[in-house]
Image (tube, rainbow, N blue to C red):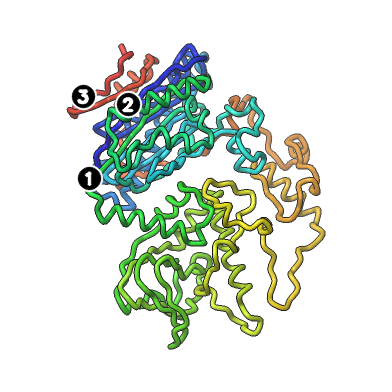
Amino acid sequence: MEVQFWAATDVGKSREHNEDNFLVDKRLNLFIVCDGMGGHAAGEVASAVAVRAIRDVVANNREIFDQCAESPNNPKLRKDLLRVLEYSIQEACSRIYEMAQADASRRGMGTTCSMMMVAGRRCFIAHVGDSRIYLYRKGQVHQLTEDHTLANEMVRRGRASSPSDVDARYKNAITRAVGVYESVEVDTLDFDILSGDRFMLCSDGLSGYLEGDLETIGRYVGPREVRTTATQEELKRITADLIGFANESGGKDNITVVLVGVSDETEDIETEEVHLTMETIRNIPLFHYLSYKELVRVVNTTQKRAVAQSEEVVREGEEGEELFIIMRGTFAVFRGEREVARLGPGRHFGEMALIDDGPRSATIRALTSGTALTIRRSDFYNLLRKDPTLAVKLLWNFIQTLSTRLREVPVAQPRASREFVEAGTASQLRVPPAITTEEIDLDLVEDDNTNPPGLSLPGKAPLEPPVDSPLSLIDDIRRIESITGEEITLPGVRADELPPRPTAESLLAAGDMTPPPPGMLTPPGMLSAPPMPPPIPSSGPMATLKPPSEAERRRHNSGHRISSAITSIEEPQAEPQTPDEP
């Protein structure tokens, strides 16, 4: 893959100082945008320390990057590289926090951090805060990062329909930042790169004027001619246009933009496979209503399996733990010796194995050679644990699919085929409750299908939910909400029908909450302290992570401003160039 890039920053129209910093390292294919906070002489120091610390950690672990570039399809190497990126942000977080503790004037300083790295045919992303990374692919724009802001959190929990509905006083409140605490939770993502992909990393000085306006991003970032390879001159022009757009829109904050374009003259079979995999997953009913980022996470859990003609993929009566999605070929479904159905590309079978370990209800045999994607139960569970919003959508789709199949079962048939009945059309599926996503096709959603489905059988009256909910259960739920900070919604019960949520004072009085230690305060704009990151193992490839030398740490802690460090390293011994560094 050939990588082209350009980067620029601007102070904007309202600020006197630029607290943004970015770094581009051509040799490592590393791109970083940081937006400092904490005021002059604090925010700019935090963002400068972050870009240098991250670059040093990544450079010191170059061998993992090289191995991943050579074997991009190795899941273990991909996880190792993501952990390197996460560790680099944790190292930056620790340094900034130590500096703030040593100087009262810098107490509470921090920075956002959005970084990406290109290794072979894979892109690796690590992210904290409200700077953003966008992907332009095949005429469409996708936001790959999630804002760690109070406004976005309120939208996610259903307290607001959009960030614009949140009180202006809280719109800039950050729920995660590098350096405010000694450690921070880092979002990571990796996926296949396609020729023609373009990436935009930017601070909120630009993204704040592009809220939900993916069409505008596409007009600026997309090529003017179809199938045009990105050049440095073109990216330079686009960067200047985007900064001009932000200033014309108000320029209320510092503006930083990094554009990256990748190209490959050979559109090979591997590129076609990536296209086919994504489109196959997207069209499966179990994965409807997922955003592009969520689809990428699902694709990353799949394994590709070649199937020979006449091979039995699933055998009736045996246990299994895999969902199969057909990409190519034709498969027959047998119950005993009788063929009951045939399945082609885009169909799936075996989904019940993801949620129970019961025996298979039919045998699946390949009539032709083909290819199938598989998702193992353990990988599916890990996906649900890591992303609660994605978990809600996936489990809702499971309920929709199973509900459709139950309604199709004749009353006289005591046992239904639970895996191989046609899943129904997209128009029969309902949007998950309290879920907003850019991928929902409103044309496929019926107006009267907005509530969770009831359960009914042909010839039987629908099962009605109990009218009265025990008050003791409501009290228990309210206590759990206040202690964990998570809101629990009861289906079919309106918020105004429930007793008020207990306050922190009432919980303390009742003994259901432990007061914080004396003197422990939460910095403004932060919801809570993040959990400590997992320790680096003492053995294996990840045990070779090398922290920067003491000399490098002293250089970072000097507090000098590092302005927009663009590096184009041709020699291994060269250091990144920083125009304002003494």
Q: How far, Cα to Cα, is label 1 from label 3? A: 30 Å
The residue at the far front in this view is: 225
Please give the label number shown on residue 47: none
Q: Secondary structure at mark 3?
A: loop
Q: Is residue 282 above or below residue 541?
A: below
Q: Residue furthest left?
A: 571
Q: SS class of the residue under badge 1?
A: loop
Identity of the residue drawn at 30% across and 15% down: 579
| Location of residue 313 in the rendering, given as x and y in whole percent from the top left corner | 38, 74
Residue 396: image quadrant is bottom right
Question: Quadrant where the C terminus lies?
Answer: top left
* Residue where numbered disc 2 is placed: 236
Q: Nearer the viewer, residue 206 or 113?
A: 206
> Which amino acid, by three-letter code, is at mark 3?
Ala
Residue 173 shown left or right of residue 126 in the figure? right
Residue at 41% x, 56% y: name it: 279
- 1 or 3: mark nearer the eye: 1
Badge 2 crowding class, 10 Å Cα cut-off, few under 14, some 14 to 19, many 20 or more, is some
Q: Which residue is mark 1?
A: 265
* Mark 1 residue crowding within 10 angstroms, few (<14) / some (14–19) / many (20+): few
Q: Residue at x 48, y 61 (%)?
A: 284
Report the disc number at residue 574: 3
- Residue 171 place in picture, x, y as percent: 60, 29
207 or 542, which lies in front?
Answer: 207
Name the front one of labels 3 and 2.
2
Dot 1 or dot 3, earlier in sequence = 1
